[in-house]
Amino acid sequence: MQKVQPEEGESVDIVTDNISRLRGLFPDAFAEGGVNFDVLRQLLGDAKVLDEGEEKYGLSWHGKKKARQIALTPSTGTLLPCPEESVDWDTTQNLFIEGNNLEVLKLLQKSYANQVKMIFIDPPYNTGNEFIYPDNYADNLDTYLRYTGQVDGEGLKVISNPERSGRYHTNWLNMMYPRLKLAKNLMSRDGAIFIAIDDNEVARLRTIADEIFGEGNFMGNIVWQHSVQPKGYSGIFSVHHNHILMYRKSKDFELKSLERTADDNKAYSNPDNDPKGLWRTGDVRNALDRPNLKYKITTPSGKTINPPENGWRWSRKTLGKKISTGEIFFNEDETRIIRKIYLDDLDGRTPETIWFGKDAGTTRSAIKRLKDEYHGEAPFDTIKPVELIQRIMKVSGVSEGDIVLDFFAGSGSTGVAVLEKGEARFILVQLPENIDDSKPHGKAAKKLGFNHVSDLTIDRLKKNTQGKSGFRLFRLANSCIRIWNPNRSNLGKSLLSHQNHLIKGRSEQDVLYELLLKRGVDLAAPIESREVAGKNIYNIGYGVLFACLDKTITKEQVEEIGQGIVEWHRELAPSSDTHVFFRDSAFSDDVSKTNMVAILEQNGINHVRSL
């Protein structure tokens, strides 16, 4: 029976995965375990893919290399299940995760790579007061566990990023870059990401997003009218908008139309009782210069109409057909042609890049809703309207079973939007950031009993899950599997202390969910249990994974437990390889372990591991 290795307690190793893919494409470029870049250049046709000069186009800042590296460094953490704080644990597909989103995004890589249909995030806008995550590149998880208390004995603080700081933009970029890199890996090929931001960092965000997602995948800069009421400032603009930058994962993404409203249809009428119904006039000119579409038209009375400057919108044959059907007609003196656009031919409304508050909600309307939910109190001030998120879901084509991710969950508007639609499922992530009660919304939050932002997120989700699909709550923590960290001055004691590889105090359920994460199984996958020989046997994901985590398995129990797993495996007949896990310390001797492996392997179960 093979033991789980330390690296198997980590999240996916993105560097190793990238090298593996490169090796598959260009095996000739690898020699003795390394990349021969001269050969790789030749295989690429010696293309000038890299600018080796000193001056390169792009955005650089202090720490960019480290920011890129941290996205590639695996996490050794886990997510602890909290069923008692969840809603409809056994049936829901929704997930809320409390923890540093950088670590959580790493942990989600194996289970959710290429599976997320839509991502919406509303990160800190870096106006000088927002929370900035003090990521420690050497030891992220331990740093997180310390700064969830905001301050430790060494003075590690969760602080704002004042504009007077010499690293003002740098701190923000170092925080955003690795998170966007990891987010891209989770997006499905037909997925998209929407990033809310204000004027302060939109230029830098656009630059790093172009780099990460590709300029060709930029879909648009949606300008959202977040407020309507003019502000009483003097000498400066009254700002009423935020930006929402949209990027797709690939060309497989399809932008969907919005539903038409009565206002959208006001321009359509039927003055000539056309049997095809309501219509409005449309343009016949081509937007681009098309020399091949520059031809003259002869009217029924023999007059000639010259082409527009750029040419017609259609070929001569197509335009002739439209004239014959009446879709294109001439004015009374036949000096120009007119196009009819029929309402019945339209499939919704093409999304535009300006979203008005009357259609997508405003900050004020979102706060009003929050006050309605909390008896007149507003425990959050930068809340996004549920209508805005649902509009984003609409244009993204989110449908039943799709995953919607928000790793700056805040007040939980994304989760509420998904719950109300009742089709997709969500994954939300929020740090337990302390609430600042020096501000009005912070005072309101404290009055309601919230000490952390994540407390509010959880409570608001619970308020909106009544009669809906609920959510599973997880918390970021250190791995359940102990990492070998010996005391060099007393190796004997270290060896004895590592006989049990699991951390004390962790439940069987804690270990099971870490196995799900590390084996790449959905955290919402069903877990069933059976009692065999007085021990609990767990089946996860319909036979993808079996586990017996009891602390003792005697040699007399080996046969019965092994056969119990075999019989259950036959019932389920999983299509993929099955992995089985045991506590290494549970077996009385090596013979018992060997016998267990033999029983399982003889029945086609070849992946048997010990913890």
Image: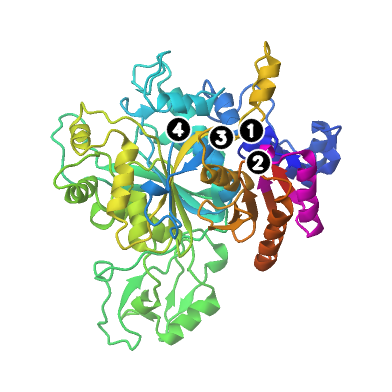
Q: Secondary structure at mark 1?
A: loop
Q: Which residues are magenta?
A: 581-607
Task: State the residue position of label 2.
Answer: 583
Q: Amino acid at mark 2?
A: Arg
Mark 2 is surrounded, within 10 Å at the Cα level, by few (under 14), some (14 to 19) or many (20 or more) other residues, namely many
Q: Amino acid at mark 3?
A: Ser
Q: Residue 501, which numbered label?
A: 1
Q: Mark 1 or mark 2, which has the lower sequence index?
A: 1
Task: State the residue position of label 3.
Answer: 479
Q: Secondary structure at mark 4?
A: helix
Q: Secondary structure at mark 2?
A: loop
**Residue 71 pos. (x, y %):** 57, 33
Quadrant position of the N terminus in the picture:
top right
**Residue 242 pos. (x, y %):** 32, 42
61 left or right, relative to 194: right
Residue 378, by quadrant, is top left
Task: State the residue position of label 4.
Answer: 204
Of badges 1 and 3, the one in the foreground is 1
Q: Secondary structure at mark 3?
A: loop
Q: Nearer the viewer, residue 315 or 380?
A: 380
**Residue 303 pos. (x, y %):** 42, 80
Verify CB contact (< 8 Å) between mark 1 and mark 2.
yes
Quadrant position of the C terminus in the picture:
top right
Of badges 4 and 1, the one in the foreground is 1
Q: Is residue 522 magenta?
A: no
Q: Mark 1 or mark 3, which has the lower sequence index?
A: 3
The span from disc 1 to disc 2 (Cα, nearest Å) is 8 Å
